[in-house]
Amino acid sequence: MITLLLLVLVWGVLAYRRASLQRFTLFSAVLLLAGTFWGEVGAASWLVFAVVAGVLNLLPLRISLLSTPMFRVYKGIMPEMSTTEREAIEAGTTWWEAELFRGKPNWQTLHNYPRPQLSAEEQAFIDGPVDEVCRMTNDWEVTHELADLSPEVWAYLKEHKFFAMIIEKQYGGLEFSAYAQSRVLQKLCGTSAVLASTVGVPNSLGPGELLQHYGTPEQKDYYLPRLAAGEDIPCFALTGPEAGSDAGAIPDTGVIVMGDWQGEQVLGMRLNWNKRYITLAPIATVLGLAFKLHDPDGLLGDKPHLGITCALIPTDLPGITIGRRHLPLNVPFQNGPTQGKDVFVPLSFIIGGPDMAGQGWRMLTECLSVGRGITLPSTGTAGTRLSALASGAYSRIRRQFRMPIGKMEGIEAPLARLGGNAYLSDAASMLTVTGIDLGEKPSVISAIVKYHLTHRSQQSLIDAMDIHGGKGICLGPNNYLARGYQGAPIAITVEGANILTRSMIIYGQGAIRCHPYVLKEMLSVQEPDAQKALAQFDAAVFSHLGFAISNKVRSFWLGLTNARFSSTPVSDATAPYYRQMNRLSANLSFLSDVAMATLGGELKRKERLSARLGDVLSQLYLVSATLKRFNDEGRPEALLPLVHWACQDGLYQAQMALVELLDNFPSPIIGKLLKVLIMPWGAPFVPPSDRLDHKVARSLQTSGPVRDALAQGLYLSAEEGNPLGMLEQAFIDIQQAEPIFNKIVDVLGRRPFTGLDALGVEALSADIIMKEEADLLARAEVSRLRTINVDDFAPIDLAANKEQFSNALYNKNAAPSTKRPAKN
Ligand SMILES: Cc1cc2nc3c(=O)[nH]c(=O)nc-3n(C[C@H](O)[C@H](O)[C@H](O)COP(=O)(O)OP(=O)(O)OC[C@H]3O[C@@H](n4cnc5c(N)ncnc54)[C@H](O)[C@@H]3O)c2cc1C
């Protein structure tokens, strides 16, 4: 009995610590020897041990008795993997998220990643041309009057190589780090979403990126300097009316034929396409085009259908229609459709040359894993940070019921969400670009941040709008919120619409890429050499079994002890978060294996289950990014409320995803059993408390380290045309005015916080305050009124067709009255 108990205990410890099979065998043998010595273990037990240990440890025996039949079953149930799926799965690399997925994250690894930093050149660019273009841009003019950036801004962007941040220096580009690109985009986004997307798109997935990775030397030498100098404007056209999310289904074609090119007969492609939603298309001079290439006459080889191919097409060729615009949600960056009818180009127009025919999907998925981690997460983060800062300032300035609205508990709740999400989003964006700058192409992480940071940005803008009331609703040059609010669905939709990203991509790719053995098992099926295939499968599947057992033991033990004894790299107030993430990480890993084992290929179709598993992975990533940022910043005490809020919210959301997963598990019995196993004492986490919300909300309404951390690197200069900068100035003015106001009120009695200028004059003449204080009150009153007032317009200014409006007005006034004369 004692031997058995000891065996279970030792196996538990070994499994928890992920010991090897040899160690299991050795420790079991030692315990059995001790048991024999105590007289508890007889020949029968030794026989069982010898058989089990022999089969498991002797490879030929294990393969023939266990792995061969298992492999047969596995091959039967594994769904076929198409080339497209395989390319998507294999695209990119895994990084920190793989640690989180595997149940035992090494926190020191996280802390050791370098803190992202700007080079002197990058910093100078941000302080120089970026500030200048922010100064030059007036978002109301862009969105309402011109429906475009001004010609001066376009010229400035080209001259200062804003479209060449990713292009290498040898081609005349800026060759900035991913971190620098992210900071540039965040700053631009605070001034104008049109400005940020116009700059973001050429620096993301598109001709520049594709050429640098796959272009032939001739293509690079020709196009990259032209793109860097702004002589060519690129766009990338994949989407069409029939193929949005399912981009692999594009009906656009290229057929290999002989044709006339500049007076000579050459081998080329006859292209036909119908694309829509293409950013920069209306003004593009070169179109990165994705289409399906066919070779029916075998002119290139023996494959009649070569697959998705990407080519660079000058937009002035005959047969191309381009120039019309869509109007995306009153955020009128250049975006529109394009069609091509029997456009002939030589094969050399394929990006990478004829050898890359049919490689388009791989190229796109590989490049997407980088671009998707930078542009949209950065602009989303900027939206969240600015919403938080603006709402904090406005809540302090705007008074109702004789007090700042930010003091009301109802307003504290959205304010706290804004503060916590702003800190977390910036942290996640920073960690992601750190990975990219380390050379990773983190496809799973980029999907996580694309989804979560754009989603949180949209939610933050809704919170900010609610806090601002009518001030947020009335459009005009002084409205700093509404265009962001209107445009938020754009970021949600592009580069993989969010519902799809959450339901299919994060966990779909994550489970296969981050799991240490699943991909190896899947690939073993495709190995043509039967012996090799079996050996690969055997190694993967037995390691997998050990891994799954370990995660189960870890999940149970960490749940039983509430992770109290698990390791953390720190011993301060954030230590519990590391411990609880050890627990959630083990849960995720264990439940993944259970879900895959019980559902197999069906899991792919059970989108709501895989979305919830993806949610757990995502929250772990976001919380770990928060802790990493806090550590990088030197663990400043003043930022702890934001860190606590972000971590508690993240852990709570991860827990709710687990609860929903288990409550909806296809087998309710398995779901219930799993719940008892991983949460033996019930669900452990609660959302941030009202008290914590209060702290975060208060810190957003006070100048100090919290606001400084959230405002870092944003364009908040107080100048006409930058309403956010003016709001920031008003916020400072009001804070300075408050103690003077209180001094006056102490003497003169209670007053409303209005007419501060007149109050200042009265108090000055009563010798209650000094001249400078009266001046300050006068300035604060101007700021206050500017903050609470909204724009209004002459009716004609709002009419898009002013001529028709004037005619209608004229006719109305000139028309004979239809009113009946009043009776006496
Ligand atoms: C302003 C703007 C700019 C763009 N710029 C470009 C560009 O420059 N180049 C380019 O090629 N494309 C561009 N796009 C296209 C963009 O990538 C697509 O809009 C996007 O892929 C979604 O396609 P769709 O709009 O047709 O939506 P649909 O594919 O019709 O999707 C509708 C909804 O169904 C959901 N859905 C679809 N499949 C699934 C699934 N399997 N599981 C769960 N939910 C699912 C989606 O998440 C979405 O919510 C742009 C789009 C817009 C609006």
Image (cartoon, helix red, strand yellow):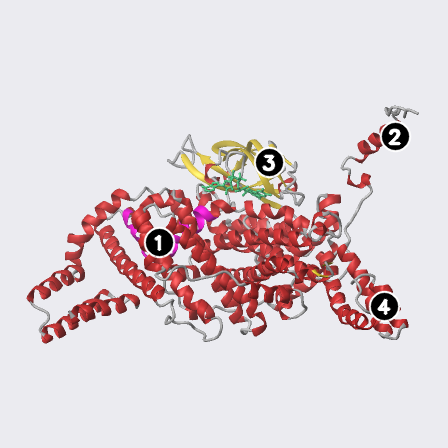
Where does label 2 land, which residue?
Answer: 813
Give the residue at the far right of this rendering.
824
Which residue is tagged 1?
A: 592
Residue 225 location (% of width, % of height)? 61, 52
**Sequence-first disc among 3 and 1:** 3
**How would you rate the neighbour count of disc 4 (Cα within 10 Å): few for under 14, some for 14-19, many for 20 or more?**
many
What secondary structure characterizes most of the magenta part? Answer: helix
Side of 500 where 464 appears, left or right: right
Magenta residues, as a range? 502-525
For the residues labelled 3 and 1, the Cα–Cα distance comes to 43 Å
Q: Which of the two labelled residues, at mark 4 and mark 2, occupies the earlier sequence position?
A: 4
Q: Are marks 3 and 1 in contact (CB under 8 Å)?
A: no
Q: Residues within 10 Å of mark 2 (few under 14, many from 20)?
A: few
Inspect the image, locate mark 3, and give the three-letter code of the amino acid beneath it. Answer: Thr
Q: Which residue is nearer to you in this view: 669 or 248?
A: 669
Q: Which residue is mark 4?
A: 760
Q: Left or right? Give the position of 283 relative to 773.
A: left
Query: Mark 1 touching mark 4, by CB under 8 A?
Result: no
Quarter of the image that includes the N terminus: bottom left
Spatial CA span between label 2 and label 3: 45 Å
**Does residue 574 sit above or below 159 in this rendering?**
below
Quick check: is 520 in the magenta stretch? yes
